[in-house]
Amino acid sequence: MGGMAEAIYVGRLLVATPLLEDPNFRRSVVLILEHDEDGGTLGVILNRPSEIAVHQVLPSWDALVTGPSVLFQGGPVQTDSALALAAVMSGDEPLGWRRLQGKTSTRLGTVDLDAPPEILAGEITQMRIFAGYAGWAAGQLESEIREGAWYVVDSEPGDTFNSDPENLWRAVLRRQRNELAFVSTFPDDPTLN
């Protein structure tokens, strides 16, 4: 399993293995937003839609959000704060939007929710708002990967704004070209296997 740890970088996905029982992360798919050997890792869970409609909390952004237009549970840290991801049309960096670090080619970035939505309305092609995020101290995620809690895989453009988030875990695993494709068929209770 050597060589897995350095495969963590911004824009990749962490997919919970069936062994990961922590209710915060069970069957989750996490997009890595920041990774620093010394500073740790930050990401958001992509497949946890909440019951809270965006228009209830951030009405001015509702029109720009990609369905389902609810807040997503980004992770267990700072659940009372919102973080937004958006894809933009051009290679430019519009005001109020910041490209994911270290990814010059990506059109994915974070949105400043204090900015007026009008200035971004013409630029944003897709957007999702997350309550909270997932965070790991330096070295913590690497040791969880070694313990078998996470698979690290490449993301595809459709993952972040997937319209069927409940099936994202299986979909991401199913497209892998190795034994991970079989994991997607695991029953919800692994003891039944």
Image: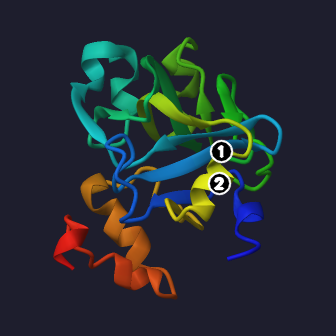
Q: Residue at x 65, y 22 (%)?
A: 96
The part of the image, by quadrant, that contains residue 64 is top left
From the viewer's side, name the closer residue of 80 and 99.
80
- Indicate left or right for 77 with 40 as reference: left
Q: Identify which amino acid the numbered label 1 is placed on.
A: Gln
Q: Identify which amino acid the numbered label 2 is placed on.
A: Ser
For residue 143, the mark is: 2
| Residue designated by label 1 | 140
From the viewer's side, name the closer residue of 2 and 110.
2
Residue farthest along the bottom direction in this orientation: 178
| Labels 2 and 1 touching (C-beta < 8 A) | yes
Q: Is residue 95 visible?
A: yes
Q: Residue at x 80, y 48 (%)?
A: 102
From the viewer's side, name the closer residue of 12 and 5.
5
From the viewer's side, name the closer residue of 162 and 28.
28
Disc 2 to disc 1, C-alpha distance: 5 Å
Q: Residue at x 49, y 59 (%)?
A: 149
Mark 1 Cα shell of 10 Å, populated few (<14), some (14-19), many (≥20): few
- The x and y percentages for residue 153 are 57, 68
The part of the image, by quadrant, that contains residue 166 is bottom left
